[in-house]
Amino acid sequence: MGRSYGFCMKGITVFLVVPVLLLGFLGAQGWAQMTKVTLGVEFVNARVTPLWLAEKEGFFKKQGIDLKALQISGGTQGAQALVSGQIDASYSAPAAFIPAIAAGAPMVEVMSITATMPYYLVGARGIKSVEDLKGKTVGSSGLGLSASRLAILVAFGRLGLDPVRDKITLVAAGAEPERIAGVASGAISGSVVAPEFRSKVEQLGVTVLADLRTMNIPWENDALATSRKFLQSNRDAVERMVKALLEGNAYILTPANRSQVLEILMSRLGLKTAQEATGAYDDLVKYYIQKKPYPNREGLQTILTEVGKIVPKAASLKFEDVADSSIVERLDKSGYIDSLYK
């Protein structure tokens, strides 16, 4: 009886241990297949929400990507980090990486993040229309080829203003909080700011002169970029990263997830009220999130034209020199993107 009991217990032990070992082996195999990717993020605003949600909801891990997101200060530093191999990909502005490409940097956009001009053109007290900016000082983030400076120049063209003819002085006025403070104090007469700051703008009595998102300006403000070397040697990893971000887009565009999206907007952006979060959410759904985020050919051409006025080599660049649509195209034609919305 004792021998029989002992044999049974050994059998039970083997029966329990084998599955545990097998599961451990399979788990180790799964982790061994995870690909480490370092992503530089050059800005913090509501348009980063698909990335934040893809991290929070485990979409990168689901795609076998062990993502490390690093905050990077500005497009110039982002381009340098990408080319040097310090990061593998970046959330960047085409206005920042196109000059780098013109200078010979082997960078390329693989996915559009924001295909619109996400700014209000605002004016100080006493500035009631765009015409009132003539002869005044307008501030952008810097004097280089920043997204905000190019947005101002393009918007002026659409609104009938010419900085030279109309004697408008462009100055470096810092990031959006500094620019808002400058406009509110009258240190500068105008600037562009993200609509997430609408409540702050209203509180300070700053006038919204134009909502640039509604002007149908071909543009691309933010994109997922990588080096051509990384794309060539790690194409599968780039595709899996794009898939995770596409899942983030679909998550936001699914009405049932509204409360979770509002929660992450409030926590990540430090928004104080539900009204602010709701405004940012509505902007995401209406203006920013794209189901099929192909690199925007017309938007990139607008930027190439503007950059080319300052960096002559950029004027000769073509869409194919700065963007590669093949990954988004493959995921679209395969039905993967449509499957996220069923």
Image (cartoon, rainbow, N blue to C red):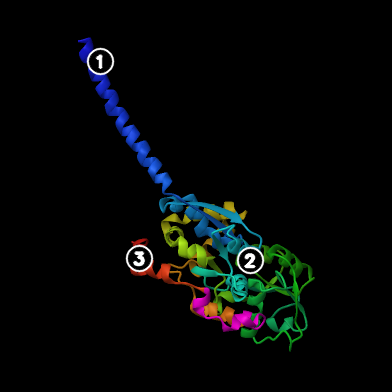
The one of 143 and 208 positioned closer to us in this rendering = 143
Q: CA distance from mark 1 to mark 3?
A: 58 Å
**Label 3 is placed on what type of residue?**
Asp
Q: Is residue 72 left or right of residue 258?
A: right
Q: Position of residue 127 (x, y in %)?
A: 73, 77
- The C terminus - image quarter: bottom left
Location of the N terminus by quadrant is: top left
Q: Is residue 169 visible?
A: yes
Whether label 3 touches label 2, CB < 8 Å = no
Label 2: which secondary element: helix
- Which residue corresponds to mark 1? 6
Q: Could you say where residue 293 lies in the image, as x and y percent from the top left?
A: 46, 69
Label 2: few (<14), some or many (≥20) within 10 Å? many
Q: Nearer the viewer, residue 95 or 3?
A: 3
Whether 318 is among the magenta residues is: yes
> Tag 2 or tag 3, which sits nearer the N-term?
2
Q: Which residues are magenta?
A: 307-322
Which of the marked residues, 1 or 3, is nearer the chain's N terminus? 1
Residue that badge 3 annotates: 338
Above or below residue 191? Residue 262 is above
Instruction: Answer whether residue 19 is magenta in the image.
Output: no
**Within the image, what quadrant is residue 187 found in?**
bottom right
**Which circle marks residue 98 in the picture?**
none
Q: Which residue is mark 2?
A: 75
Badge 1 element: helix
Side of 302 where 175 appears, left or right = right
Can residue 252 be seen here? no
